[in-house]
Amino acid sequence: MTPLDQTTDQILQLAAKHFNVAQGDLRPDDDFFKKLGINSLQALDLLTRLEQHFHIELPDYELQGVSDFRTLAERIHARL
Amino acid sequence: MLDLDKYNSLGEALGAALDQWPSETCLIESDRERENVRLTYREFKEAALPLASALQRAELAGGTRCAILMTNQSKWLISAYAVFLCGGVLVPLDYKLPADEQLKLLAHSRAEFLIVEYHLWRAIMKCAAFSQIATRFVLVTEAPAGADLAGAHRWEDFRDARAPQPVTRGRGDAACIVYSSGTGGRPKGCVLTHGNYLEQCKSLTAWYPFWPGVRYLSILPTNHAIDFMVGFIGPFVCGACVVHLRTLRPEFVRDAFVRYRISYVTLVPAIIKNLERGLRERFDALSPAKRFLLDRSIAINKRLTRKRPNLKLSRVLLPAVHEAFGGELLALITGGAFIEPATLQFFYDLGIPVANGYGLTEACTVLTVNDLKPFRADTVGKPLPGVELRILNPDSEGIGEVAAKSATTMLQYLDDPEMTAETIVDGWLMTGDLGRMDANGHLQLFGRKKNMIVTEEGKNIYPEDIESAFERLPVKEFCVMAANYVWPARSMVGEQLVLVVHPEVGSKLAPDIVASLSDCNRRLANYKRVHGYLPWDYDFPRTASMKIKRGELAEQIRASVSRDSVVPL
């Protein structure tokens, strides 16, 4: 598993826990808005949770145009 | 506030404000728990003049267009004032658009200058169309040391100590070009004059005044017509203060209300509904005794504020609710999209007036606002002073297209005389919205006549703008329509888009086509996605130049199938 895969995996785990869905249901290429049925505000909530977990600060604009876990993981990974 | 009749341009009025209240705070920029910037009017002027002077040296002259592409922050307003001081025309672009669309609008506006945040510039530099960028001078804010800026200049270093020469502009001259839609179809660049803004500001502040000490929380993008007016021009010409947040996470927004004792904020319906949901959850979690007391206080507040708001009383009756909003909130302003009356009433019953209004970029900012005398949740308020409304061809219930005559009506759509002529007829702005005036002079809205939708986030979506996403579908033809345009509904909520698909002759919509259609849809930004598709077996009616006659197609569909035939995606 590459470090990026590990980050992706942790994001999937945290998202599943945060939105109360089964962990195995989420895949890296899933559109999180659609899969989790969330709006942009709820996505921002998830971002805060991820920041706390990874001990980073992610500007809001990093989430702009991002809707799948893989790209989100790349953005987070670049700041680790 | 300043007497705006004395001034001919935004540059003049803003300049006078900077001299009128030198020691008042005009701008605060906060990022999470940190405060990045706090400026008095004097300090704002000191930051803007050297920039204006340097822009003049770079030949930004009267009428030169300068685009601005930034999130809400202090440099946005400082740059805008500097551009106005030079007599420039500001082109505020939507920072939320994808970079390739920003480039298209930049090209359409023919802006010679661009002031842009580094992360947005970085995305633009990666676009295929970047090599054709015609903007001749680019200023980038907050670029890291050593970053490749492709010939752009650093905003922070771009200063000239010599005094700039203010350039006079008239009320009829263009002040801003504001895009009210995306780029897929025809970009709608509303050319708004200095007179439009000054008149709008005068009428709006007559009903919702600002004064020194008032703090406006600027959350809606400043490139949007509403925030530009109530989150910049309005507060500044009244000596008030604008608060910017670099992080718009709900928890930091909540903190900002308390930390900065916010007086006004404008929120789109999606966020107001989110606030409502949060408050209701908190109320539901109260013990039965506390809940009983809360409900009783709400009932008393409701009775005592029936005729007009009484903020002092409401703050005493419902202290916890008001303290959560900072304790000094005068009103929530809502705009950009339709909001359900029940949500408005919920907040009013808690003693938080919601200034619900209606407007469009073509009319500068707003045409009608609730005057709270008394509060009405079922209307979008009364026409502002100077605005005349007419209902065209009313039906038996008095409902027809809303037309407006106002000194705030834009000059034209940039480079589009045809669309301008369709939209402004004999001085009347055709809004494309269906409404009715009630006996008390309030406007009620009932749906749209035009083929478009507005999302809860306040985004205008024109169906033709998103058709390019489906270009590669292996079908004979297709088009996107607003469901309420095809099947008129007396509603402003739950608006949806439908993809009408005509398969190749003799074939049906095979599962692989539906799969690829669904895939194309997923690639669109979530607010642009179509709700479903409608299989259609007939040729689309077209003009001689092969454009789809959308009105005729809508009629044919309406006569043949109902809304239930749409297959959800």
Image (cartoon, coloured by chain):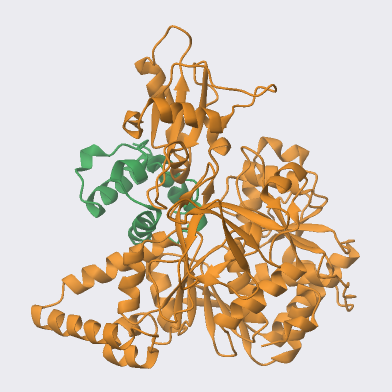
Residue occupying the far top of the picture: B506
Number of marks in picture: 0
Of residues B488 and B92, the one nearer the viewer is B488
On the picture, is B302 further left or further right than B148? left
For the point 88% across and 79% down, the residue is: B163
Left or right of B120, for residue B559: left
Give the image quarter of residue B534: top left
**Side of B250 where B284 appears, left or right:** left
Question: From what the image shows, is residue A60 above or below residue B334?
Answer: above
Residue B250 visible: yes
Give the chain coloured orange. Answer: B
Residue B405: x and y, percent?
A: 66, 63
Residue appearing at x 22%, y 86% in the figure? B297
Which corner quadrant holds the N terminus of chain B?
A: bottom right
| x and y, in percent, of residue B157 in the image | 77, 67
**Residue B192: quadrant of the picture:** bottom right
The percent position of residue B88, horizontal first and vertical second, equals 82, 64
Colour of the chain lettered A: green
Is B317 placed above or below B365 here?
below
Left or right: where B188 falls relative to B486: right
